[in-house]
Image (cartoon, grey):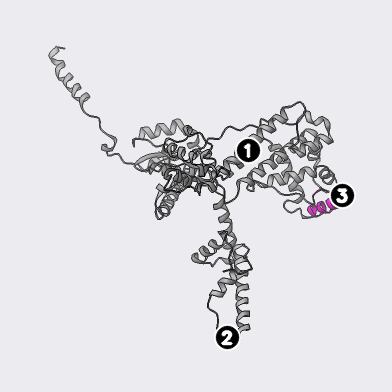
Amino acid sequence: MPVWGLTPILKHLATEMSAPKRKHDQENRIFQARWETDYLFTEFKGRPMCLVCLETKSAMKDYNLSRHNNTTHKEKSEKYTGAARAAIVADLKGKIHRQQNIFNTVKAVVNEHGGFSKLSAIVTNGTPSMQGRRTGFAGLLHQSGVDCPVLHCIIHQEALCAKTINFSHVMDLVTKVTSLIQGGNRALNHRKFVAFLEEVNAAYGDLQMHTDIRWMSRGKCLERFFALRTELPVFSEDCVHCDTSAYCRKLQDTAFLCNMAFLSDITSHLNHLNIQLQGRCQTVSDLYAYMSAFRRKLALFRDGFSCTSPNLSHFPSCEEMRRDVPECEKIFPKVSMSASKTSTPWSHELFTAPLSVTVTEQPAELQLELCELQSDPFFQSQKNEKGILFWRLLPESRSPLLKDFSLSMASMFGSTYIRESNFSTMKHIKSKERNRLTDEALFQLMQIGSTKADIDIQNIVQQQGRPQVSHEDKCCSARCRRGSLFRTLLETSCGIRLCKNSSN
């Protein structure tokens, strides 16, 4: 080919290479409905998003979606066809829309009180609809430009960590034996068992059922079961008609009893921690202190079990087993009781003890005010005051940044305890017998049921208008009757105790 023949071709290639590339938003691509059932994708904010892993793609191209589905979710997607596949798609789309509705509802309520800019932290129960990075509440919050800590409820975390103890074989047998005695339609066995325990003067008069929903029930169930470990095989062999020989052999096995003793003791420590984490008037620093103390306890337990002769001072059930069977200390479970250091998105030491912290380790914007605070003789004399009690003494005009920091820390919730307790109160108030309560009446009863203030019902009744009567005694008696009736209604509906003495 002559050289002059290449000139048009080279010019054309140069033009193609120098031309700007088309952008995706200029290609006018639209989402096709068949991609939902074919590739499990849906349209979310103008982009295709996988319904399974919630990953978004930049371009609406059939090849991109097909490749993602075949390389990532091929085995799962091929299991369902036809109506089953359509039902799966509808369910997954419904979850995304529900998450969006949760965010929109919370946003509308928060905007009425100043917007998300006033948030110090958000505490969730850890579900994907709340913690999801893309379509969850936390993800949608960050996409809206809100930058605040999103915390997982510390009580829920403690319950999840407690489930990692690998002693399912113990709990399975405990649950099966308890169900054989008092579960289902075994009322006769249950009555016989209670009479048997009373006859032999046992430590407890009955067993306790366990459910996973009630986290703390496992400790009480194990405590009673271990205390009745000698009576259970005798009763099972004599009074239970089905074959219980395998259960009886387990309950007489030393290794199994050692595992059950250890599980009973460590669960009691976890229950104690759970109770400490509950409560209304607790800051995140208080909860962090409880968790730090429990980590130190775990280190103490680990060192005690690592000795040649285990130190069982804090494990009463294990100590009882060692007294009964001295050689069992060699078969106690060698459990790795350790916990990694918890990282926090706040300076809890600065909030707890601001006068003793190192200034250079604190945020730069607080260092100057902190230097002035630690040098003030008045605040040096208030070293005994800790936490909120100390920060109440600090005037905002003197240290505005430190005051703002203290208010932010004090307003943080470390758990969802208040929300859960209020749900329980609402369930108690609006029961099936009182399903005609209006929203206004329910709101007022919730205010009374969730407050800590003592309600002087006699004073409230005296301030109300009373019927005109001719005699003073009749007026007083009517007023007392109304007060007693009002008191009874409030106490039964809200589950609170009202003060009896009137005070102005």
The residue segment tinted magenta is 188-204
Which residue corresponds to mark 1? 293
Does 191 lie within the magenta span?
yes
Which residue corresponds to mark 2? 469
Q: Amino acid at mark 3?
A: Val
Would residue 268 appear left or right of 370 to someone viewing this image?
right
Would residue 442 appear left or right of 253 to someone viewing this image?
left
Secondary structure type for disc 2: loop
Q: Amino acid at mark 2?
A: Val
> How far, Cα to Cα, is label 1 from label 2?
65 Å
Q: Position of residue 471 (x, y in %)?
A: 61, 86
Q: Position of residue 376 (x, y in %)?
A: 49, 41
User: In the displayed image of the protein, which residue is found farthest to the right?
Assistant: 199
Which residue corresponds to mark 3? 200
Q: Position of residue 268 (x, y in %)?
A: 70, 42
Against 466, residue 391 (above or below) is above
Q: Residue at x 41, y 48 (%)?
A: 397
